[in-house]
């Protein structure tokens, strides 16, 4: 069995002093590939550094919507510079967040648009954060789609079936994290059962969202991806080995790892 954690934050301070152990534990659990995702310019630099230190780790670089208001002059230029470097396989995370509203919506939309345009210019896929902003996200994706094809993923998806289908119609991938394993997530599991085989991804979003039966564990870590994968395999009535092969193949295709070198 070989799994691919498509979204975690290995740069997070909760992993300080134990990153080598975390990566090794993931590999021993069958999670052989990981993408560590930036949230700020500084975070993205650290993600790129970690990707260069660990063969199993790749990096995404970007400015997450909750940090847009903190971005300083020159931060976006750093993202542009990093986007062309070896080890970087995606842009983000980007998107919109109307739950916390740490950054004005208009500023979030500006940065989301920057990531979308950069993705279309470079061919790098983009990673979408969505919280209490499904309609606004959809409208921006639809507008971007008018310019050309989209290559992105709705990370830690928690939307309903119609939103999932709208995203699929735009060419998006759908990724599920630990929340899909929670007892009260029946509706989300139903959505997961309807995602087309070739658009499904899995993730931990570590250090957050530890899956059942490890929900109380802090921090979450990529080794625990096996629980989310097992839940989704059961939902989709697949053997675990077949499910793992499917989502890992999807991830390699999405991130175009054949073109990556460290």
Image: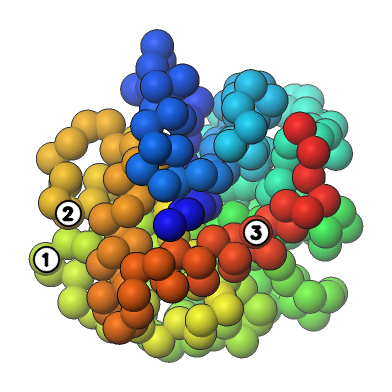
Residue 23, horizontal then vertical, whole percent: 45, 30
Is 75 on the left-hand or right-hand side of 2?
A: right
Residue nearest the observer in this picture, 53 or 186: 53
**Secondary structure found at label 2:** loop
Contact flag, marks 3 and 1 (Cβ < 8 Å): no
Residue that appears at 50% across and 67% down: 245
Residue position for label 3 = 252
Instruction: Indicate whether 24 appears above or below 253.
Output: above
**Which numbered dot is residue 212?**
2
Is 242 on the left-hand or right-hand side of 105?
A: left
**Secondary structure found at label 3:** helix
Q: CA distance from mark 2 to mark 3?
A: 26 Å
Q: Residues within 10 Å of mark 3 (few under 14, many from 20)?
A: some
Residue 176, horizontal then vertical, whole percent: 39, 63
Is 33 on the left-hand or right-hand side of 238?
A: right
Residue that appears at 57% across and 78% down: 198
The nearer-to-camera label among 3 and 1 is 3
Locate the C terminus by quadrant: top right
Residue nearest the observer in this picture, 67 or 189: 189
Residue 92, horizontal then vertical, whole percent: 62, 47
Residue 42 appears in the figure: no
Label 1 vs 2, first from the N-terminus = 1
Q: CA distance from mark 3 to mark 1?
A: 30 Å
Quadrant position of residue 133: bottom left
**Secondary structure found at label 1:** loop
Residue that appears at 61% across and 73% down: 172
Residue position for label 1 = 183
Locate the N terminus by quadrant: bottom left
Label 2 vs 3, first from the N-terminus = 2
Contact flag, marks 1 and 2 (Cβ < 8 Å): yes
Residue nearest the observer in this picture, 134 or 87: 87
């Amino acid at each position: 069995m070989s799994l691919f954690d498509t979204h975690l934050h290995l740069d997070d301070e909760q992993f300080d002093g134990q990153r080598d152990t975390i990566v090794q534990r993931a590999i021993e659990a069958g999670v052989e590939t990981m993408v560590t995702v930036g949230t700020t310019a500084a975070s993205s630099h650290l993600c790129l550094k970690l990707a260069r230190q660990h063969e199993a780790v790749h990096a995404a670089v970007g400015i997450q919507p909750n940090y847009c208001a903190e971005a300083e002059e020159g931060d976006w230029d750093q993202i542009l510079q990093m986007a062309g470097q070896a080890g970087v396989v995606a842009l983000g995370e980007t998107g919109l967040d109307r739950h916390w509203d740490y950054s004005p919506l208009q500023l979030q939309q500006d940065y989301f648009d920057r990531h979308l345009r950069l993705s279309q210019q470079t061919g790098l896929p983009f990673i979408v954060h969505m919280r209490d902003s499904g309609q606004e996200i959809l409208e921006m994706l639809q507008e971007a789609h008018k310019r050309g094809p989209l290559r992105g993923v709705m990370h830690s998806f928690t939307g309903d079936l119609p939103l999932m289908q709208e995203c699929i119609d735009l060419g998006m991938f759908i990724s599920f994290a630990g929340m899909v394993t929670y007892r009260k997530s029946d509706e989300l599991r139903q959505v997961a059962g309807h995602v087309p085989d070739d658009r499904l991804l899995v993730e931990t979003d570590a250090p957050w969202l530890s899956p059942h039966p490890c929900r109380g564990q802090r921090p979450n870590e990529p080794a625990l991806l096996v629980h989310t994968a097992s839940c989704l395999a059961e939902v989709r009535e697949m053997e675990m080995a077949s499910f793992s092969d499917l989502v890992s193949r999807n991830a390699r295709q999405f991130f175009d790892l054949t073109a990556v070198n460290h």
